[in-house]
Amino acid sequence: MKTEDRSILGHFKLYLILILFIGINACGYSASDKSGNKEIQDSQINSDDTVIDESQVIHSLTLSPRDPKPGEPFRLLAIGGQEIKKAVIRVTNNGSEFPSKHSRQGNGLPFWRIDEFTGAETGSYQAELVVKNTTIKKITFVIAQKKSSSNSQSIWESSKSWSHELEALYSAWVNALFFDATESTSWAALHEVTQNKDQNFLYNYLSLNEDNATEKNKVIMQPDCADNPFYLRAYFAWKLGLPFGYHVTDRGYLGRAPQTGQWVTNNAHTSKTQTTLSFNGFLRNVMNGVHSGTARTALKDDNSDYYPVDLKRNALRPGIVYADPYGHTLILVKWIPQTENHPGTLLAVDAQPDKTIAIKRFWKGNFLFNTSEVIGEPGFKAFRPIVIKENQFYLLKNKELTRESGFINFSLQQQKLKSNEFYLAMDRAINPKPLDPETALLDLIQALHEQLLVRVKSVETGEVYMKAHPGVIIPMPSRAAGVFQTGGIWEDFSTPNRDLRLLIAIDAVLDFPDRIVQTPEDFKMPALRSSTQVKTKLETLMKEKLNELFITYTRTDGVEQKLSLTEIVRRRAGFEVGYNPNDGIEIRWGAPENSEERASCRRHVPANQHEAMNTVRVWFQKRLHPPT
C-alpha cells in the first residue's frame, strides 16, 4: 500500500471515530456524567420526566360559578393527562345536549381545558368528561335562582379538606390565570389579574360580583413578594371553601432558620357581615403576618407553611413557590417546552414593593440560589396541604407527603445543594435534550435585555418621584442588610436587589462560552468542532448580539440616551453603586465621569451616603446578598 493511501485510510478511520463519538454525545448526556458528583447525577432529568406518569393522572371536573342562575353563562374546567386535549365536555338536561360556545386549553401540569356554555333555564344538569367515547368524570349541578348568604362568624367556612385532586385543580387554575402572559406582561396589582374574566376561571365564582372592577365591595389584592403566594392560595381556598392558614414566623438568624409560631387560619372570628369585605380584611392580616423569612423555614420543619419538592418537571408545577436565600419569592405559572429551535422556558410571577405584579423567567438573573451564609433554607416549595380531622385543621407532616399519597412528594434534594449544582439541575429540567449552543446563548442575551428593559421602568419611577419632590433626600439605611431589606420609600425607589440580580445576569451571559468547555454534554455540539472552537465562535456571536440590542433612558436634560448592551456590560462596575435614587439618572445608568452623558446630571448623593455605598459595594463585587 502506498504511503498516501495509508494516510487517506488513516484519516478516514479517524473521521469515523469522530462521527461515532459526536453521535453518542448528541444523543444525550455523556458517560462522563456517571463518574461525576452524585448530587448532580441525582438532579439530572431525562426527557421521559416531562411525560405525566399515567398512574398519577388526576381527573377532575369543576363548575363555575358555584351556583349558576337561569340564563347566566357558566364554565367547566377539566383536568387530566394529555388526553384532555382531545376530550369532550358534554352537558345534558333531560336528554338534550348543550354544546360549548368557546374552549381553551393548556398543559400546566396537569393538562386542562375550559369550556364555556351559554346560559340555560332552571333545572338539573349533568356534565361529563368524555375521552374516546368513555366517560371518565361526571358531576351534576342545578341552575336555579338562589341568593348567596353566609351566617358564619369566621372569615369563611371550610367544607372540605385539601386533596391531591384539589391541589391539581389549584395548579391548573394558576396556569390558566397566567397562561397568555409573556415576560413583558405586568399588572398594577394582583386583583387586576383576577378581574380578568377570560383568564380567571373563578371570576365571580361566589356570585357576589366580588371580582367586578366597578363593584364597590370587590376583592382588593395588593401584596408584596412574600404575600403574593399566600394571597393567591387564600383566594382559591376562599372561593372553594377550603382551609387556609399562615404562621406568624420570626426572621431567624445565621445558624438558625426562621421558626413558626402562632397559626392563623380562616376560622378566625370576623365582625364583618359582608363576605368580600371580610376576605379583604383577612388579607390585610396576612400582609401583616407574612414576611421575607416565612418561606425560608427549615426544609425539615413539619409546622412550616411550605415543604420542599424535587427539582423535576413533574414536581415543579404551577403554584409551586420559589423562596430565594434573601427573602424574595416567586410563583411558578407556566412551562414552555423545549423545541428543536428554541430552549425551554419556565415562567413565574412575582410582586414588587410598589405592588406591581410581573412575569419573570427562570434563570440566574431572576432566581438567586445559595445555601452558604444565608438565613434559613431556600428553594422550590409547595404549600403544605391542610386537612380537616374531627372538625379541626391539621397540617400534613413531611412523612405523609409521599408519592403514594397523591401529593407532590416531600424531598430534601435541595438541602445544602451548591449553587452550580442547583442551576445545572434546573437547566436539565427545563431543557432535557442537549441544546444548540448558539440558540442557548441568544436566549440568555434576550433574557438580559428583558431584564434591562424592566430596570428602565424601575429607575424612571424613582426619577419621577424625585422630580416631583425637589430637594428631598431619601434616607439610606446605614447597614448593608438594611440597604437590601428596609421598607418604605427607600424600598420603593432604590434598586439594590434588582441591580445585584442584573450583575449576576451579566456574568451568566459572559460566562456562557466557558460552560461549553466545562459541560459539553449539555449541548448539541457541531460535528468535527472541538468545544474550544465552539467557544470561540460563541464569543464572536456574543459581541455581535450585544452590539445589536439597546435600551434607552431619558437624561435629566430631557435627551434620550441610547445604550447598547455592549456599553452596559462595559460599565457594569457602575451598577455596583447605581441603586440610590438620590443620585441623578445618569449616575444610576453608570455614565462615566467627565462624559457628555454625565454632564447633564444635577443630583448627587450626600457625602455620608456615598461613603456608606462604598462600604456596601463589596457585596455587589462578590455577587452576594448580605444575610437578611
Image (cartoon, helix red, strand yellow):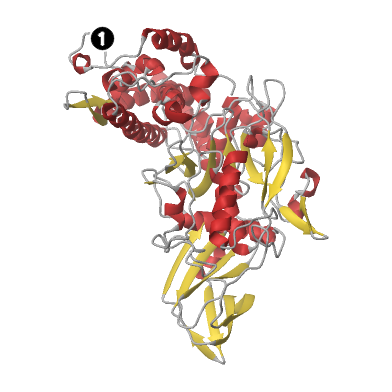
Q: Say which quadrant the N terminus sits in.
A: top left
Tell me where residue 413 appears, x and y as whole percent.
69, 35
Q: Residue furthest front?
A: 271
Identify which amino acid the numbered label 1 is placed on: Glu
* Relative depth, front residue between 466 and 134: 466
Q: Is residue 414 left or right of residue 429?
A: right
* Relative depth, front residue between 225 and 216: 216
* Relative depth, front residue between 143 and 147: 147
**Which residue in the structure is indicated by mark 1?**
593
Q: How many dots with numbers?
A: 1
Residue 276 seen in the current view: yes
Residue 432 seen in the current view: no
Residue appearing at x 53%, y 80% in the figure: 90
Residue appearing at x 56%, y 36% in the figure: 426
Above or below, 487 against 161 in this view is above
Tell me where residue 307 appears, x and y as whole percent.
69, 42
Above or below, 385 against 413 in this view is below
Circle 1 residues within 10 Å: few <14, some 14–19, many ≥20 = few
